[in-house]
Amino acid sequence: MVRGERGILFVVSAPSGAGKTTLVRKVISQLPRVSLSVSCTTRAPRPGEQEGVDYFFITRDEFSAMEREGKFIEWAHVHGDLYGTPRANLERLQHGEDLVLEIDTQGARKIRETFSEGVLIFILPPSLKVLGERIKARGGDSEEAIQARLQNAHKELDQKAWYDYIVVNTEIEEATRELASIIIAERCKTARILAGGRGGIYGTDNG
Ligand code: 5GP
């Protein structure tokens, strides 16, 4: 559906194992007019991951070529692999659709610095212990990869202070409500409603 106004760019970051992917997908399936930005990565697919749904799985050469051609709005090295957000994904914003970028803190910082827009949301695990258990339970990662992810998680957690919102994912239903509420509240911001001409008879020229 076209709303006649620009969609909102949401950036969601979390250390791996915080349950971000499940949470984001649940919210997107419940709300209209919001979709997920599928990134490109050079990492191998995990069991059950699908091309074009979870990621576009590409080679390092393909990634470098896209980077040279300016086809990423941001990209980063994460856990030894390359991850990037295709510029083309942002076109959906022009059709009034909100977009969720599930990217790491380096990518989020880049978005904050490059674009004047963007609502940044950080998902926190209930504790570091739970985080470790979730990373191990996921499967598909070697012991080395698990350790690297845990170390990186500590660094990522330090970045939460400059995000606009924090959702603690202790219980999935509660966290889903919180994330959905943030999206809905952002849609209702006065500045957005008036800029989009949705103030109706209560618009800016109504004294
Ligand atoms: P995973 O390999 O567990 O799917 O993702 C590892 C990390 O890379 C996560 O923190 C995820 O948010 C991040 N990531 C996924 N896609 C992108 C992207 O396009 N750009 C950046 N900067 N990070 C990404």
Image (cartoon, grey):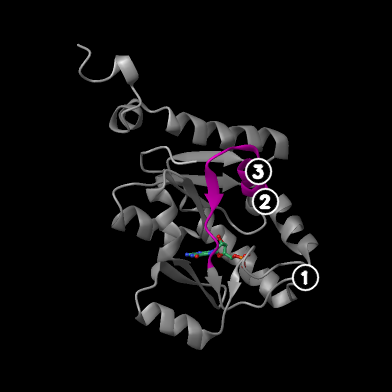
Specify whether residue 9 is in view.
yes
**Left or right: 34 with respect to 93?**
right
The answer to whether the residue labelled 2 contacts the one labelled 3, judged by CB atoms less than 8 Å apart, is no
Closer to the chain start, of discs 2 and 3, is 2
Residue at 65 percent across and 49 percent down: it is: 25
Q: Which residue is mark 3?
A: 29
Q: CA distance from mark 2 to mark 3?
A: 16 Å
Closer to the chain start, of discs 1 and 2, is 2
Mark in the foreground, 1 or 2? 1
Q: Which residue is mark 2?
A: 19
Q: CA distance from mark 1 to mark 3?
A: 22 Å
Q: Is residue 63 above or below residue 147?
A: below
Q: Amino acid at mark 2?
A: Gly
Q: Residues within 10 Å of mark 2 (few under 14, many from 20)?
A: many
Q: Amino acid at mark 3?
A: Ser
Q: Position of residue 127 (x, y in %)?
A: 67, 46
Q: Which residue is mark 1?
A: 47
**Left or right: 116 with respect to 44?**
left
Q: Say if the magenta span includes residue 127.
A: no
Q: Is residue 152 above or below residue 95?
A: below
Which span of residues is magenta-colored?
Answer: 22-39
Respond yes or no on whether mark 3 lies under 8 Å from ligand 1.
no
Q: CA distance from mark 1 to mark 2?
A: 17 Å
